[in-house]
Image: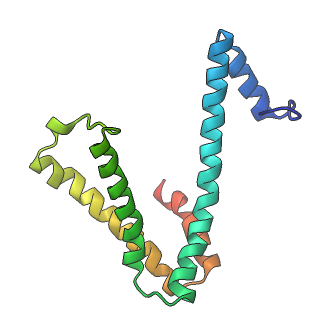
Amino acid sequence: LCTGFRTSPFCLSLLEVVQSSGSMGEQQSLAMQILTATAICCVYMAVGPFLMVLNKEILDKVGFKYPMLVSSLGLIFATVVTHGMRAAGKLELKFKGQIDQRFWLEKCLPVGLCHAATLAFGNAIYLFMGMALIQFLKAFTPIVTA
């Protein structure tokens, strides 16, 4: 991971953490976990801008004027996959007995509705604004919400 970059502060601290973790097997396991987490973060950072450009193309250039449908396609896909994994026995519900109707209505439903609204309005903006302004606003969001 850090071959050729041994003077980098990140690589030096990474090497110190790995070397202080004990046996060689533990060091390899920790190094693999760090490498996996780094790869996931890199993929996440690459997919975000790609999806912004793709949404802009679909909604603006192609002329598909249904941003809520575009937003819901990702949620529908995630729902189908998780239900499929549950049916195949690959996903276990840990808190199945603790979730009743009241819990679902008071805690889950408001969060889900707000999340759906965020996705829908976030895609609707592609119909009215340019890509540069949208990227600026999305980059500014953590500052406003922190």
x and y, in percent, of residue 123 in the image: 46, 75
Q: In the image, is 49 to the left or to the right of 108? A: right
146 versus 15 height, above or below: below
Residue 54, quarter of picture = bottom right
Residue depicted at 33% across the width and 57% down the height: 80
Residue 15, quarter of picture = top right
Residue farthest to the bottom?
63
x and y, in percent, of residue 76 in the image: 35, 64
Residue depicted at 62% across the width and 15% down the height: 26
Q: In the image, is 14 to the left or to the right of 36? A: right
Residue farthest to the left?
101
97 versus 107 height, above or below: above
Residue farthest to the top?
23
142 and 48: which one is in front? 48
In the rendered image, the quadrant that contains the N terminus is top right
x and y, in percent, of residue 83 in the image: 29, 51
81 versus 92 height, above or below: below
Residue depicted at 43% across the width and 88% down the height: 65
64 and 131: which one is in front? 64
Residue depicted at 40% across the width and 83% down the height: 66
19 and 80: which one is in front? 80
x and y, in percent, of residue 31 in the image: 67, 26
50 versus 123 height, above or below: above
